Image (cartoon, coloured by chain):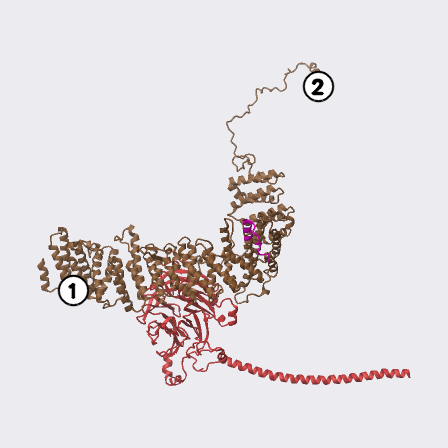
Chain colours: A red, B brown
Amino acid sequence: MEVVIASSPVDAGIGCWDLHSGAEQLRYRSCTSTPHGLACVGQRFLVSSQLRDSSSSSGTILYWSWNKPQVEVKSFPAEPIHPLISNSDGTYIIGGGSSGAIYFWEVASGRLLKRWHAHYRAATCLFLSDDESLLVSGAEDGCIRVWSLFMVFDDIGMEMAKHPYEYSFSEHTLRVTDVVSGYGGCNAIIVSASEDRTCKVWSLSRGKLLRSIDFPSIIDAVALDPGEHVFYAGARDGKIYIAALNAESTPSNIYGKHIIGSLSDNSKGVTCLAFSMDGILLVSGSEDGTIRVWDAKTRNIVRIFRLAKGPINNVLVVRRPLYSNFQTSANSHASLSRRHVPLLPPPLSKYVNSTDEIVDSGAITVPQTPSSDIMDAPYLSSHVLTKQISELQQQSSAATGMEVDRLKLDCKRSLEMVQKWKEMFADLHKFCVDELLGNDQTQTQ
Amino acid sequence: MARSKPSSSKKQPKRGVDFKKIKRKIGRKLPPPKNATNTEIKSKAIILPEQSVASERAGLAVSKKGLTLKELLQQTSHHNAKVRRDALTGIRDLVLKYPAELTLHKLAIIEKLRERISDEDKVVRETLYQLLKLVIFPALKKDVPGSLISLMMAYIFNGMTHLATDIRLMAFKFFDLVVQHYPSSFFMYAEKVLQNYEDILRKNHIYLQDRSKLKNALVGLVRCLSLLPCNRRTVDPSYGKNTETQGSLHAYELEVPKEHTDFSSIIKRLEDILPILVNCFQDFIPLVHPMSSLDAQSFDCMLYLLRSIDLSVKFFLYGIDKHQTDFGVTKPTYNEKDMPVWGEIATPVFLRKFLEVFPLNQLHNTSGKDEDKFFILNIEITEIFLHSNEWIFTSAILMERFLEFIENLLSGKIRFNSRSGKALQEKHLTSLLPFIPRLVSLVANTWKSRLLQAFTMAFKDCKPESTLNLAFLSAIEEMLLPSKRQGILLLDASEPEILDHQITWIRELPVLLVRLGDTLSSLSKVILHLLLRLGQYAPMNSSLAWEYDIMQHTLGEFYSMCLDDGSILYGPFMKLPKDCQELSVCCLYYFSSLDSLLLRSLVYCCLCDNLEPSVLFRIIDVLHSAYKIGHLQLVDLISFFVTLVARWKVLPGRLYTHVENAKKISNRETFKAITGAVCSCLRQMGDDALIFQIVQRVILDEIPLNPPIDNLCGMLRLLVILDSRPTKLSEQSIIILSNSISEYLIDAASYIPENGDEVTDSNQISICQYYLVPCFFLFDRSDKLLNLVLDLMGSSIGEDNSSLACNHDTQHTLDLSSRIVAVVSILLYMHQDIKIRRRLSSCKGEITRILQKMRLQSSNEMGNTLEERHKIQFSFDRLKIAAGQLNCWDADELKIISLFE
């Protein structure tokens, strides 16, 4: 089931609608999300970072499972987290802090694997490239940085390199509001929007600015067309501008160079955009609390959902597993067992743990997919590996012992041989000498 | 002859007289025979179909001596030197006179002229040089003929290996000329040319005894070497890169890398040349003797030698850098085995030896001129030292000497004596300044502070219009901010002394900006960029960020200043180009708490007519964003917005359709857009009720100042957008508002179309709606306001003209009849609106009173002309009908009214 989920900075909960039928699903309560602060972790549960008044130093991240409206798990990271994303498997959660640091958690254990200083000002948006090897982060100081996740965990490599990031783009003069990346891993393009009223297109392979497009208003959200012909830019004046990526645009545009059109519904500012899985429906969230579903091809509104009076700042389109079925059938026996085994992983930890603890647990913890509930125990490959290694070591020691014995035997045998040969030589020598002497003696005689 | 005569005379008598002998005299012309045909042709002119090219030259391009190009070219290979020279000058004349000849026959000309490159005669060569330099190359500049160059090069190389020294040297000069005009040709022949240079320099004792000759050769070498790529430490950071040229994003790039990639041969040659150059230079050292003064020729030679050394060192460095960056970022940087190619092993030894000579005699005081010369040489050596610093391990003593020199240079202890010295000094300082940041970060602490001290002093003393400023600014940027490439801070800001210097620089920036004015917008842009970067990158809560915040006090002057007498002095902001304005506006975003004083000076700028609307909208955007991240107080922002709406000057103008008023239309449209932008900002701020309270308070302060109708309309719109139904306006504010609204409505009534039935200008209707709609919203939300307003309108009709005379406001000078008409048209307009009609029906008392007043006025004969009375009567009737439609009059009241009739 493909659902639209949306959240708001005022407490209106997380709304959830079936994209194709329009039926509203469960509404998850008590959520005041930050911009870009809503994510779905591997289709298993929802996670959102919370807005908090500046008085408290720590931030809040909440978990909701699909079938319960209440908050299930609360975590309190060391500082307020603004943007939050998860990789597609739901193994990791990455969050950007208000100090400019980026946090990297493992979901299954809740461990904070890494925290690094990424920006000089608060991070505003994060994006993972489609192969999930590169992380793109934008910040309030207008800086966009591209991180290789391999490098981030390679401490030695980090020290050797001139800078920890792959690229740092600082052409934006004001806050970066959104960043998206196209297909193609390290060869993709990224599109960034900023409060300086421009969107900029960058090349990840060459690390340079390809195009800068001026808009009539501030762009708060960007969505890339799946074919990467155009991108959609949600502006504060309520329009969604369509900007060309490929073609040379005709000069007679009313909005400006490279902008080929707009979607408009006389709404207040557009704050967030998302594409449906099939790439046809474009979902936009607006300041006026409504979520509009557009057909990107015909440019018409297909559906309107209403979340709250207040603004919306996050819209996601995710695939939700069909729980309703599962719930009714398995309710009787599963509810009991679930009470013992918590469905959701433990809260995220505040600090990077000491190293000895890491050694203890496995290297990678694969998350449970909802379908494979049977496999309750996580598969810890490293244990098996260490066991094998130790076995191998033991085996090898036994083998060498045998070898030594065999060699000793060999040695002994050869020594005996040597002895034998020596004796033979001595006999021969004696015989020869005797022979010679005997001859002499006979001659002399 | 004498003998033949008698024989003939002997013969004659023998013969009979058969034929009569005709005796003729020799030399006498025969008379024509009688039957002869007259072959004589007589004509006035002979017209031939074509002329011979060779002989006739009347229509041809000829030189002063009447020779054609072909003849001249032939003469260039004449055995007589004088003829050859004359031919060359002839070609020169000819080409100057007929430039077309050159382009037509360039190949032929060059082909012939090149033979003269190794001419034995000095004068001929010199003439050829001048000819090529002044005439031929400049004329052929447009179409670079590669074949021409290769034609010449063959002979030039020939000349370079000629036995005669003069010819050799001249060949270098010719090559220099070619390179001057076609720089790319150097790379094609670099290896060969450098080898020739090497040869000639190696034997300089033999060939180059004459300093001027050596100098000539060196000039060419310097020019060639300066073409080599090096790490350009550009003083002006390339901020505004042009990216608009990119057509499509995913297209394959057709451009091939422009850089010449095969440098290995050049490197090898340079490696050979460098020691020779150093040797050459050391030969000159004895000249720098205390007693003898340095002659100009040797000085020039030394200078050029140093330049060539400098350039080749730079080239090596470039190679090393390139080598490193080629292999990605992860590679460990200093791995010596990887790059023996770039001449690292051989050169340092020579250089170290060479640098030992460094302080070229400072001890004795020679004449001023000489001191300058040594000074220049020293600077050159220092430059080489700084370039090579990165890969040569120098001894501490030498380092000290250099550092001391640099310090003295910065602090101005060493000065030029000559008059042109000032410019020269600036030029040399600009070349040294880019090294300062790196130097400071590397040297020991005592030197660090000394250098910084000198640097700061020099920066402070620098005049705003000086070209040095750019170099200073880029050095400062490097020392203040984490570098772009490496992302690490060069200087440790935690040391108090360094921090002191940094603070001094930061404080100096806004002052410099204000002093610059709009004279050098490029420099202003660089400063603004630096400020922006500082705001972006200064670590949070550090002293640098603190210093950045403090800066806004001085920055206010940059925008505008309110003088004591109330007039406003606009700062450089207003006059700078748009990109600078936008940059400076962006800087505002990064102040952690925006000062209200700065906001005030900003609002003065916004209210100025000259400010472009797009910049104004940008300011609104940025301030709103700053508020969102908590850099700006809510009250400050709202008062900024309200002031903007209340004071912005809308040019008066009613006739919208006229062409000459196009500007006025745009002006009003701009104001509408401003109001719209402010409204959307206010709505996004959050708690409407709270914001409404603040906005209401600020607006009520503004309203008594009697703002123009447009501004009032804008303010009413702000209120309406934030208000809800029923109104949140307080009692007191309703009273104040009703006062101004009643007058506002009467003014706005003039925009109401005369006759509702007629199809009037749609433009006018929209304007009318624009003015009236906010009032209607207010009326709809508050009955009390409507009552009060109607009351006031009624009383304004009733008042005497005389009592109004004292009030000089424009609103009141409307004469009574038109006021009545206005009131009626407003009421009728309100009547058309269904919502308001419902409201109106509840205030019949007020309407009755108005009707009564009108009745009174129409009957009042004094002071009213007949026409006016008719007008009033007409309006009265219209209103009465409308009132009747309201269905609210009972029989008694209607009777009262009809009684008046």
Residue at (39%, 53%) from the top-left corner?
A: B518
* Callouts 1 and 2 on one subunit: yes
Residue B304's x, y, as percent?
A: 57, 51
Q: Which residues are magenta?
A: B356-375
Q: Which residue is mark 2?
A: B4
- Quadrant placement of the C terminus of chain B: bottom left
Residue at (78%, 83%) from the top-left corner?
A: A425
Q: Is residue B371 magenta?
A: yes
Q: Is residue B344 magenta?
A: no
Quarter of image, res B277: bottom right
Kind of residue sitting beneath label 2: Ser
Nearest the camera: B213 or A345?
B213
Q: Earlier in the sequence, mark 1 or mark 2?
A: 2
Visible residue check, residue B654: yes
Q: Which residue is mark 1?
A: B843
At numbered mark 1, what does the secondary structure look like: helix, strand or loop?
loop
Nearest the camera: B806 or A60?
B806
**In the visual, does B560 lie left or right of B313?**
left
Badge 2: chain ID? B
Residue B358's x, y, as percent?
A: 58, 56
Q: Residues within 10 Å of mark 1 (few under 14, many from 20)?
A: some
Question: Which of the two discs, 1 and 2, sits closer to the camera?
Answer: 1
Badge 1: chain ID? B
Q: What secondary structure characterizes most of the magenta part?
A: loop
At numbered mark 2, what does the secondary structure look like: helix, strand or loop?
helix
Q: Is residue A237 above or below residue B420?
A: below
- Tell me whether circle 1 and circle 2 mark residues in contact (CB < 8 Å): no
Kind of residue sitting beneath label 1: Cys
